[in-house]
């Protein structure tokens, strides 16, 4: 039985960027590998929009860490792509030495201290979108995000150096907080790959009609959709919490944290433990929403949760 989310991309599968596919082959032959994830988005969104061709306008600079290379995108994000992944209020930050140093330190922390987490990020992340709000936009900035419609690409802002979602905020930036947010989105991508490749939810399941799970700790946000989660959203969150709580525990067991970093990780750990246990209990009550394979995944999640 496969009782955990896949940690590797299956060769020859839809998500294999090296497979023989006319659109992918053309981009590879043209030296536009940075646009490969956007070519996959064309098939997932089914809008007829040639996202891969639009993505050619993006520049990228490689970030090399522990034998892995990530495309750090620059230039203006094409409007068609920004609209599809809800980034119309954002622009890409300039590539400064300060930004590169922070990003490199975060990835190096994953590689040296959290090798399993880094292996997941390396496998399921290729592109990095470091964004900021456009001038004049008056909304709260995202911390980090990823979209199942855009495989291999994660989004984050300066806030990711200060914020451990949902509620831990630091006045001091830390590459360790950025490392957690990069891992957070890499885990989301791995879950999305698995759910899109393998039937996890029962026939007829739909996010639109899903039973809702009340999320009491999000009540203060005042947004209804954040207070009541669909089964698939809760499943994602439970998988992510299991990984991030291990990340936080590992950090807390080290002796090289600043006083502020330790306090923030402790607060996030203490908040996350009851949250993941609650979500696990709620998902098990809704087992009929899953396939046999999905219920096997739940059993694996239960074991992981009990080991925390």
Image: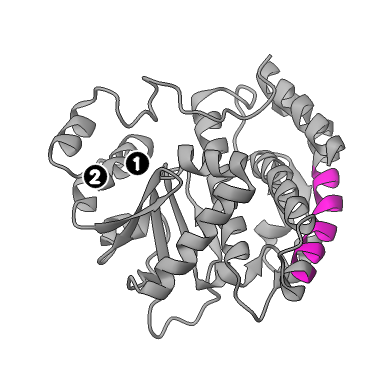
Majority secondary structure in the magenta region: helix
Q: Are marks 2 and 1 in contact (CB under 8 Å)?
A: yes
Q: Is residue 116 left or right of residue 132?
A: right
Q: Position of residue 92 (x, y in %)?
A: 35, 68
Number of numbered discs overlaid on the protein picture: 2
Q: Is residue 102 left or right of residue 273?
A: left
Would you say residue 285 sits in the magenta stretch?
no
Residue of label 2: 52
Residue lying furthest top: 1
Up-down: is 138 above or below 285?
Answer: below
The answer to whether one can see residue 208 in this image is no
Q: Position of residue 81 (x, y in %)?
A: 31, 55
Q: Residue at x 31, y 44 (%)?
A: 38
Q: Residue at x 78, y 52 (%)?
A: 249
Residue of label 1: 41
Q: Residue at x 30, y 42 (%)?
A: 47
Residue 113 or residue 261, whichever sits in front: 113
Q: Residues within 10 Å of mark 1 (few under 14, many from 20)?
A: many
Report the magenta residues as a range: 263-279
Q: Position of residue 121 (x, y in %)?
A: 51, 44
Q: Could you give the CA–CA distance between mark 2 and mark 1, rounded to whole angstroms?
A: 8 Å
Q: Residue at x 76, y 32 (%)?
A: 301
């Amino acid at each position: 039985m496969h009782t955990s989310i896949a940690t590797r991309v299956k060769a020859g599968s839809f998500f294999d960027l090296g497979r023989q596919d006319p659109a992918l082959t053309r981009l590879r032959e043209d030296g536009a590998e940075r646009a490969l994830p956007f070519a996959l988005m064309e098939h997932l969104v089914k809008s007829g929009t040639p996202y891969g061709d639009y993505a050619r306008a993006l520049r990228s600079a490689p970030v090399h860490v522990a034998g892995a290379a990530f495309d750090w995108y620059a230039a203006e994000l094409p409007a068609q792509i920004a609209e599809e992944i809800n980034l119309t209020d954002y622009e890409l930050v300039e590539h400064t030495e300060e930004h590169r140093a922070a990003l490199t330190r975060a990835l190096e922390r994953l590689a040296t201290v959290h090798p399993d987490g880094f292996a997941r990020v390396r496998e399921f992340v290729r592109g990095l979108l470091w964004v900021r709000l456009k001038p004049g936009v008056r909304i709260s900035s995202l911390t980090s995000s990823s979209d199942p419609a855009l495989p291999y690409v994660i989004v984050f802002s300066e806030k990711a150096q200060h914020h451990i979602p949902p509620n831990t905020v630091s006045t001091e930036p830390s590459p360790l907080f950025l490392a957690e947010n990069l891992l957070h989105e890499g885990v989301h991508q791995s879950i999305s790959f698995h759910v899109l490749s393998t039937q996890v939810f029962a026939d007829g399941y739909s996010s639109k009609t899903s039973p809702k799970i009340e999320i009491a700790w999000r009540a203060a946000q005042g947004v209804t959709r954040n207070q009541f989660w669909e089964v698939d959203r809760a499943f994602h969150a439970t998988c992510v919490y299991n990984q991030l709580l291990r990340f936080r525990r590992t950090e807390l067991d080290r002796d090289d944290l600043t006083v502020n970093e330790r306090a923030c990780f402790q607060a996030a750990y203490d908040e996350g433990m009851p949250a993941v246990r609650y979500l696990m209990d709620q998902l098990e009550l809704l087992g009929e929403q899953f396939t046999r394979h999905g219920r096997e995944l739940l059993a694996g999640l239960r074991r992981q949760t009990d080991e925390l």
